[in-house]
Image (spheres, helix red, strand yellow):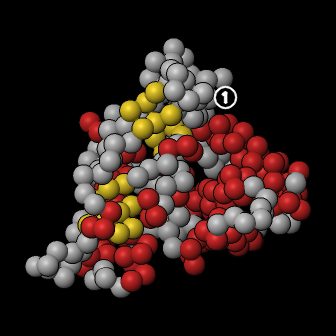
């Protein structure tokens, strides 16, 4: 559906469910049609200063349009984790209410961190978080989602690659490829998308991405996900959920682990501190 409903530049995957080669199901991605030396990840391009203001706006517009196409064009009848195409029915942990589905997901990861918070290196005000969450549920904060959309969820700018500039122009090319990690994909609220979080320094305000991104999102068919104050509060909750998922995904500190994993944990801990503090007075109406 992604290939027929969107213009997102992802390759056609091969799914092997036979478990005849390895004892689990897997996706096989074909090689990219260009050498790795001709592309650069979006964060590296931003940090290196090779993007002009015009190029930044163009990329934000295009990225927003891609997500707008995904969320409006690839939809489902129920909420929860995607299943294989030949699955006869949805799994038992799916639902027909996003608020109920998200509540189960959120309480699951929050409880996991709480049970072993020393290992995760964080102390959270769990009673306050649950109080704020009950207030959100009582206000039906998450119940404004009418149709389940395919949400990439943990996708970030590190999964997006640009073509490098040619010898005839100083401007970098467009988005050449997106290499999605679909392990956490879900049928849910488009606002759950990590790319909807916006700059890290404004994450706790729930303001979302740039105006160019949101303009592209609208042009791509995306709905008004960040118009009202309550939607900004909802975005803060999704940032907390993302940070909890990051902590549980990478687990407690391990000797000899990569620096990038350590940085992800550091981000998650800092994000939780800022976002939980912002929830105290965040409106749910």
Q: Number of labelled discs?
A: 1
Which residue is situated farthest in the bottom direction here? 49
Q: Is residue 48 above or below residue 112?
A: below
Looking at the image, is 284 positioned above or below residue 150?
below
Screen quadrant of the C terminus: bottom right
Whether residue 277 appears in this view of the structure is yes
Residue 215: x and y in percent read 32, 63
Viewer-closest of 92 and 255: 255
Residue 211 sits in quarter: bottom left
The reply, left or right, for residue 198 in relation to residue 242 is left
Q: Quadrant of residue 71?
A: top left
Name the foreground residue: 85 vs 53. Answer: 85
Judging by the rendered image, the residue that carries numbered circle 1 is 93
Left or right: residue 75 versus residue 21 is left
Residue lying at 30% horizontally and 51% vertically, measured from the top left: 32
Considering every residue shown, the one lying at the far left of the view is 168
Specify the farthest residue to the front.
21
Residue at 53% of width from left, 64% of height from top? 197
* Residue drawn at (60%, 27%) of the image: 23
Image quarter in which the N terminus is found:
top left
Q: Position of residue 76 (x, y in %)?
A: 45, 31
- Secondary structure beneath dot 1 equals loop
Answer left or right for 74 relative to 233: left
Q: Is residue 90 left or right of residue 211?
A: right
Identify which residue is drawn at 54% across, 17% down.
Answer: 89
Q: Is residue 237 visible?
A: no
Of residue 225 and residue 69, the one placed in the foreground of this image is 69
Looking at the image, residue 245 lies above or below residue 94:
below
Q: Quadrant of residue 265?
A: bottom right
Percent coordinates x, y for residue 33 in the rendering: 24, 52
């Amino acid at each position: 559906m992604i290939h027929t409903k969107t213009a997102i530049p992802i390759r056609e995957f091969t799914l092997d469910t036979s478990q005849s080669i390895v004892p689990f199901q897997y996706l096989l991605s074909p090689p990219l049609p260009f050498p790795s030396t001709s592309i650069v990840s979006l964060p590296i391009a931003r940090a290196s200063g090779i993007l002009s203001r015009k190029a930044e706006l163009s990329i934000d517009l295009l990225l927003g349009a891609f997500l707008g196409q995904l969320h409006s064009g690839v939809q489902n009848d129920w909420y929860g984790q995607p299943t294989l195409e030949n699955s006869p029915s949805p799994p038992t942990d799916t639902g027909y209410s996003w608020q109920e589905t998200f509540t189960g997901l959120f309480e699951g990861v929050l409880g996991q961190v709480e049970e072993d918070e020393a290992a995760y290196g964080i102390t959270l005000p769990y009673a306050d978080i649950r109080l704020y969450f009950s207030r959100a549920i009582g206000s039906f904060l998450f119940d404004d989602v009418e149709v389940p959309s395919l949400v990439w969820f943990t996708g970030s700018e590190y999964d997006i690659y640009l073509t490098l500039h040619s010898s005839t122009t100083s401007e970098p090319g467009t988005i050449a490829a997106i290499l999605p990690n679909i392990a956490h994909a879900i049928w849910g609220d488009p606002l759950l998308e990590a790319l909807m979080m916006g700059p890290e320094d404004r994450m706790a305000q729930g303001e979302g991405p740039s105006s160019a991104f949101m303009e592209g999102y609208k042009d791509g068919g995306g709905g008004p996900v960040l118009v009202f104050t309550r939607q900004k509060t909802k975005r803060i909750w999704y940032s907390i959920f993302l940070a909890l998922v990051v902590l549980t995904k990478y687990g407690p500190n391990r000797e000899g682990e990569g620096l990038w994993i350590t940085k992800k944990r550091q981000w998650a801990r800092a994000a939780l501190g800022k976002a939980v503090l912002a929830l105290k007075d965040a409106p749910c109406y």
